[in-house]
Image: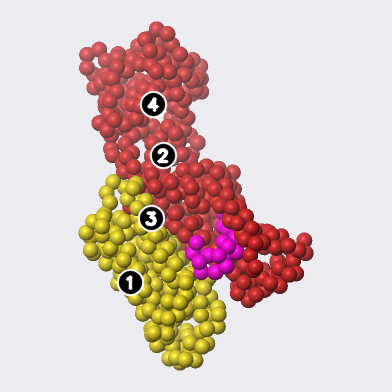
Amino acid sequence: MRAEWTKLRTTPDAAWLLLVTVIVTLALGAAVCAAATTCGTKVLLSGVYAGQAPVAVLGVLVVSGEYSTGLIHTTLAAVPSRATVMAAKAVVVAVAVAVTGTAMSLVALAEGSELRAAGHAVAYLVLIAVLSVGVSAVVHDSAVAIGSVLGLLYLPPILAPLVANPHVVEELAPMTAGLPVLTAWSLGALLVGTLRLR
Amino acid sequence: MNLLRAEFTKFRSVPGWVRGVVGAALLILLFPLTGLGGGPGDKTSSVTGPDGQPVNNSYSFVHRPLAGDGQITVAVSKLSSEQGGPWAKAGLLMRAGSRYAAIMVTGGHGVRMQHDYLYDKAGPAARWLRLTRSGDTVTGEASADGARWTVVDKVQLSGPVQAGLFVACPSRIRGIGIADDTATAVFSSPELAGAWPVAEWAGSVVSSGAGFTMTGRGDLGPATRSDVPVGAAAGDLLFGTFPALIVIVVVGTLMVTTEYRYGVIRLSLSAGTGRVRMLLAKAVVLAGATFAAALIATALAVPLWLRVVRSLGAYVFPAGPLVLLRAEVGTAAVLASTAVLALSVGVILRRSATAVTTVVVVTVLPYLLALTPFLPPSLAQWMTRVTPAAAFAVQQTLTRYPQVDSVYTPANGYYPLAPWAGLAVLCGYTAVALTVAAVLLRRRDV
């Protein structure tokens, strides 16, 4: 666990990505606020539509970054248990995202006091990060992994109105369904990823 | 040329990339399958005009027959509507079957002469209106004082007609909301001249003293997407573009980041005749392969799915062959241009994950945001105007009518920019990214 934390801490990309998350989320939220008639925590946090992208990149890089440099062999030699490695990675990324998300939500709370919306946004970002870790362990290549994650997130809402049963798609897609469904997606991806590592 | 061949060989020999491009083409071709098997064929009871366009055709009409030549003159002394609709209409109408000619006073757009649903011409500020039929020609005139007349338009209309006074009032559009509206108009007693047979006025007439007071709602004009809820636009059949776009972005990025990862870039650069030329060679190969594959897919997909969807009984807005060709070629160009954008961003960032994310976020996300209901319409229009997502305007196959207020949003299939202008926005971003990539590639120590 500490090893994973050190890896994450010493990669300059991670801090940048988290910073970009905060900036992008709040910038888009502010733009929506400026154009809309009402503005509150929830509206401001609608920026996570864009802010989830850097979080997904972070989740993907934690795994596929090791593949591209070959570090994964060292990691797995040191800790042979695949499940432990995956769990450690997921936990470290989740904590980092949670801390960033909470800081971001505190800023958003200045616009109103919708604690529920703020908590929802943090949980959402954490689950997206875990989902990305899992997907990236399944496909190994970072470009393909991030393409899959973003496709999974952004495509269903665009395509839903045009398919035969829009509601089924909306209730199953990670972005439009509720947190429980997203949790299922994330844990599922993590599980498949762990099995693929074996 | 050798450089192009080298890049093409590299591209061809990586099975993943070829599979990606072919897969993207298949996504475009096969994605509409997901839309089938849904609701039963919704045959709309939509009325169509003489050109086969769906039209709105409900209004109040007080009329009498006219077989030969004749003239009708009336003054509209008052026109108001509950919601203050700018296209509330009151005036004179002659109609023969599905064709008509009308001159009217509107709520906010002055005097107009319109005919056969699609055509509209503005006239001078006036209160007096006159329609004259002579042979097969109907002339519309307007006057401020009933003495000096100005010709607004001349329209062909043959056969016996029903002629008289009409009032219509389309629903008021507020943002993306629609409010029903009703107009009330006060006319003077109409003056008739010519071969009018002896008959009474027929229709929903409310007479008061010397003139007529009428109320009306609905519209006499082309229908738009929001009027035909179950109708589809031909551009909708290309919705496989979005998954294909993500695949192409991944391929475009990998084409250069893989070289960085395995150090092939050093070999390429030392063998090639200049870094910028190598980059251009890559761009040409990638754009060419993407455009060719995507064009085959779109050129097959549109006619095929149009036929399937129509045979299932679903209503599809008519679109001319040139419009469909533009959507097909334009979609292939969007994919090719986005692929080069991804390649350039890949050179700039040298990391696959960040490059893919950047390109997807600037192309797909603005379109998604423009569709979401929580975003104010002004921002939605903006998203499809200045971001690379503007390029999806090439898929617009619906016509936007200046004489009809409607919900003209990207979600309904109407884009703020003209098709090629939208594509030009994307190409602008691509050109800038390619230039930056070329400059960085020359300056950097690989």
Q: Amino acid at mark 2?
A: Ala
The residues tagged by marks 1 and 4 sit, at their Cα atoms, a distance apart of: 56 Å
Q: Amino acid at mark 1?
A: Ala
Q: Which chain is yellow?
A: A
User: Which numbered mark, 3 or 4, is in the foreground of this view?
Assistant: 3
Co-location on one chain, circles 1 and 4: no
Magenta range is B334-358
Disc 4 crowd, CA 10 A, few/some/many (<14, 14-19, 20+): some
The answer to whether residue A155 shows anywhere in this view is yes
Q: Amino acid at mark 4?
A: His
Above or below: residue B192 compared with residue A27:
above
Disc 2 crowd, CA 10 A, few/some/many (<14, 14-19, 20+): many
Task: State the image quarter where residue B126 is shown.
Answer: top left
Foreground residue, B258 or B247?
Answer: B258
The residues tagged by marks 2 and 1 sit, at their Cα atoms, a distance apart of: 50 Å
Q: Which residue is mark 2?
A: B223
The residues tagged by marks 2 and 4 sit, at their Cα atoms, a distance apart of: 19 Å
Residue drawn at point x = 41 percent, y = 65 percent = A19
Q: Which mark is residue A98?
A: 1
Above or below: residue B93 compared with residue A94:
above
Residue drawn at point x = 56 percent, y = 52 percent = B429
- Residue B311 coordinates in the image, percent (x, y): 49, 54
Q: Chain of mark 2?
A: B
Residue drawn at point x = 29 percent, y = 23 percent = B79
